[in-house]
């Protein structure tokens, strides 16, 4: 039961974290001048691609919302922390 509760809590946290992390990602993307290097975007994309490859190769699964939320929040952290 502890594993089920931990999974539920992680999913709940992801549901709370993802919308704001995704909004920060979108805002940062739109604010970038075309000629500026997109290093946080490339880094987050590279991390997501690598994780998806590991997931697919190891389990045949997909990157879940919790993982998306954590990656976006890591590369596009809230400024009010």
Image (cartoon, rainbow, N blue to C red):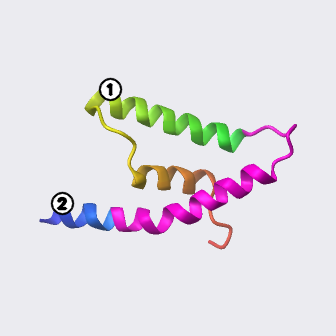
User: How far across and how far down the image is residue 8, in percent?
Assistant: 27, 65
Query: Which quadrant of the figure contains the N terminus?
Result: bottom left
Quadrant in which residue 46 is drawn: top right
Residue at the spot of label 2: 3
Question: In this rendering, is residue 46 above or below 76?
Answer: above
Mark linked to residue 57: 1
Q: Which residues are magenta?
A: 11-38
Disc 1 crowd, CA 10 A, few/some/many (<14, 14-19, 20+):
few
User: How far across and how far down the image is residue 71, in percent?
Assistant: 52, 49
Local SS, label 2: helix
Question: In this rendering, is residue 40 above or below 58?
Answer: below
The residues tagged by marks 2 and 1 sit, at their Cα atoms, a distance apart of 24 Å
Local SS, label 1: helix
Give the main secondary structure, helix, strand or loop, of the magenta stretch: helix
Question: In this rendering, is residue 59 above or below 69?
Answer: above
Left or right position of 70 against 80: left
Disc 2 crowd, CA 10 A, few/some/many (<14, 14-19, 20+):
few
- Residue at (79, 37) in percent of width and height: 37
């Amino acid at each position: 039961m502890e594993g089920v509760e931990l999974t539920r809590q992680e999913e709940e946290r992801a549901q709370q974290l993802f919308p704001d992390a995704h909004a920060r990602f979108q805002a940062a993307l739109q604010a970038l001048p075309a000629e500026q290097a997109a290093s946080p975007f490339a880094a987050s994309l590279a991390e997501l691609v690598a994780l998806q490859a590991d997931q697919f190769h190891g389990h045949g699964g997909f990157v879940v919302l919790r993982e998306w939320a954590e990656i976006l929040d890591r590369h596009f952290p809230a400024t009010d922390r």
